[in-house]
Image (cartoon, rainbow, N blue to C red):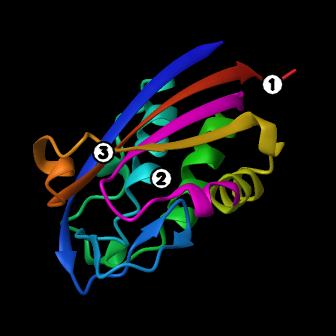
Amino acid sequence: MRIGHGYDVHKLIKGRKCILCGVFIPNEFGPDGHSDADVPIHALMDAMLGALALGDIGKHFPPTDDKWKDADSMKLLEKIYAMVCSNGYVLSNADITIVLESPKLSPYIEEMRYKIASTLEVDINAISVKATTEEKLGFTGDGSGISATAVVLLACKS
């Protein structure tokens, strides 16, 4: 078994599309970034890479490379998971926490879990997605940013 932890943060900007866990979230602000800036998926990918000591997403998909401009993070997740599997591991479970003041994400959580589980071809019960606020504290609390953490447990393929 291997455990990995991931963290990502992005500034929110007006007029940018908000995609979280592959799901479009109607909002006037979205995460700024080189790819689609899907913050929780970036944290999830970093957790998987970290569990196997394979670096981070910046190493595999550098923001200086135009090849990854506006990339769909769910497609990047597929690539990272293929690396995990080629190293002899599979996902046992993932626990993701999204920190965002607004909008409320509870109406989208099940669709997020489904998107991730479908992409990784795992049971939906292996995927946990939670959302919280920071009670108006810090950059997420004042609405200027979004962050996410992810923890994964990888198991050797049997």
Residue 46 placement: quadrant: top left
The numbered dot on residue 105 is none
Amino acid on which disc 1 is placed: Lys
Query: Residue 63 location in percent, x, y?
Result: 23, 63
Mark 2 → mark 3, Cα distance in angstroms: 9 Å
Q: Residues within 10 Å of mark 2 (few under 14, many from 20)?
A: many
Residue 29 placement: quadrant: bottom left
User: Image check: 112 left or right of 14?
Assistant: right
- Residue 77 vs residue 94, the one in the foreground: 94
At x 70%, y 28%, the residue is 89
**Could you tell which of marks 2 and 3 lies nearer the N-terminus?**
3
At x 62%, y 46%, the residue is 81
Which residue in the protein does label 2 denote? Answer: 41
The numbered dot on residue 8 is 3
User: Image check: 86 left or right of 118?
Assistant: left
| Furthest-front residue in this view | 135
Amino acid on which disc 3 is placed: Asp
Badge nearest the viewer, 1 or 2: 2
Mark 1 → mark 2, Cα distance in angstroms: 23 Å
Which residue in the protein does label 1 denote? Answer: 157
Extent of the magenta region: 88-110
- Residue 76 vs residue 95, the one in the foreground: 95
Mark 3 → mark 1, Cα distance in angstroms: 28 Å
Q: Secondary structure at mark 1?
A: loop
**Could you tell which of marks 1 and 2 lies nearer the N-terminus?**
2
Judge whether residue 92 is colored magenta.
Answer: yes
Q: Quadrant of the C terminus?
A: top right
Q: Quadrant of the N terminus?
A: top right
At x 31%, y 77%, the residue is 69
